[in-house]
Amino acid sequence: MARKNNRLILENLEVIDAGAKGKAVAKAPDGRVVFIDNAVPGDIATVQTFKKKKAFYEASVLSISKYSEKRVEPVCPHFGTCGGCKWQNMGYEHQLFFKQKEIEQNLQRIGKIELPEFQPILGSERQYFYRNKMEFSFSNNKWLTLEQIKSDEVIDNRNALGFHIPGMWDKILDLDICYLQADPSNAIRDFIKAKAEEMNLAFFNTRNQEGFLRTLMIRTSSTGEIMVLVQFFHEDEENRKLLLNAVTEEFPQITSLLYVINSKGNDTLYDQEIELFHGRDHIFEEMEGLKFKINAKSFYQTNSEQAFELYKITRDFTGLTGNEVVYDLYTGTGTIAQFVAKKAKKVIGVEAVPDAISAAKENAQLNNIENVEFYVGDMKKVFNEEFINTHGKPDVVITDPPRDGMHGDVVVQLLNLGAEKIVYVSCNSATQARDLALLDSKYKVIKVQPVDMFPQTHHVENVVLLEKR
């Protein structure tokens, strides 16, 4: 063990696991856990620490003396720099193994409850080009790779269109290709960048808050429709129209071409006025005969094909016969609520975001579903006696909360409600395990089904069926 610049060099560590946030795991000679970037379980690596805590180090790989049999060659030239697909160097069957293992360990160690045999994780048929939404940033401050910095190459053009470098809020990786969204996503992005440079348009500078071109969003759907939204920092009508007309001519298949003029300090769209330039202001997604209208601000699961599988598992876990009242908590735009409605007597969706509920109501009307009702409300306040008297006590509750899990008051209300079944969909099995432990006094876990929505990353969804004791 040697010291270099006050950082430790730890030699020939065996990587033994894959941990939280996609990092690999090893043990240091002093017993601390070491979280390592860009390593794979089975590697023997020499690493350099860059963060030291009481119980662990964080480190980066200096060299690998033995490569793991679980390794594969990453397909993306940006792997290791982009930070988006951290497991692309690990075979997909091994990715699934470690995702399953994480869910099992979280439910066992955090939940500390009686559990059934876990169902094998449902892998994604598509391991690349599976996302239906991508967001890219323009910058005149392109991230330079180590090779570019070391070379004698003079880089005059620092324009970039791509992703933020992890931990570098003002640096953007200029993308050559991205393997997350299907064609024509790469072609549209590359064309817009090339056309903007041809027109000598100013790419945004986050630090100085100046420039013209700010962000680009591309959404696609399983129906073949495409939405493109360009965000500008200020209005320049002539150049805006020239650029967007060029996009329309080059890609006539674009269903919805939108733009935003946003001069505020951040580039979030939710408080912005979306302007229609060409086509219509929405695209449609379809699932099992249901149509969902998607606008620029809509939330929709980013892997459409796996979302279909996730929703089928959720519906199957409910065991609906057509006579049940179902509460769908954190309903979002009501996708799950509408998906299960045909097998329920009535579905009540609750969501705190008013725009999402407006979209849910519109989609239900579009699909001629008459046995769903949607309400805006703070989840921890909604289930009062008046609400339950109005809508009926639920036989089944479906809950799909954000990463933080359910508020403690919501768990208490669920215990008081006493529905026969709860189906808990989660994107974070650690907070799910915490909530399951709180529900354990009245509910027993009957089934656990992990679902991989995001190949090449550490993220994983999990569906749990609970039945009243």
Image: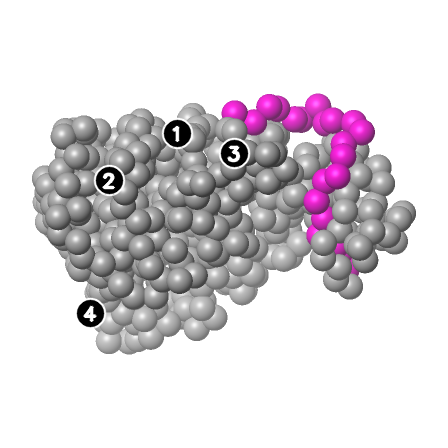
Q: Secondary structure at mark 2?
A: loop
- Give the residue type at disc 4: Thr
In front: mark 2 or mark 4?
2
Q: Say whether disc 1 or disc 2 marks the residue closer to the N-terminus.
A: 1
Q: Judge the density around disc 2: few (<14), some (14-19), many (≥20) Cα neighbours within 10 Å.
A: few
Mark whose residue sits in front, 2 or 3: 2
Q: Is residue 381 toward the left or the right of residue 469 in the image?
A: left
Whole-angstrom CA distance, mark 2 to mark 3, is 27 Å
Q: Which residue is mark 3?
A: 78
Give yes or no for contact between labels 2 and 4 (Cβ–Cβ under 8 Å): no
Q: What is the spatial separation of the Cα atoms under label 1 and label 3, in whole angstroms?
A: 15 Å
Q: Secondary structure at mark 3?
A: loop
Q: Which residue is mark 4?
A: 390
Say which of marks 4 and 3 sits in front.
3
Q: Which residues are magenta?
A: 55-75
Q: Which residue is mark 1?
A: 129
Q: Position of residue 285 (x, y in %)?
A: 22, 37
Do the residues under discs 4 and 3 have CB atoms within 8 angstroms? no
Residue 1, percent across and down? 89, 47
Above or below, comparing residue 173 to residue 394 in the picture:
above
Name the N-terminal-most of marks 2 and 4: 2
What's the distance in space between the residues labelled 1 and 2, CA to CA? 30 Å
Mark 1 vs mark 2, foreground winner is 2
* Foreground residue among 395 and 122: 122
Q: Amino acid at mark 1?
A: Phe
Horizontal side, residue 468 vs residue 198: left or right? right
CB within 8 Å, label 1 to label 3: no
Q: Secondary structure at mark 1?
A: loop
Instruction: Say which of marks 1 and 4 sits in front.
Output: 1
| Amino acid type, callout 3 | His
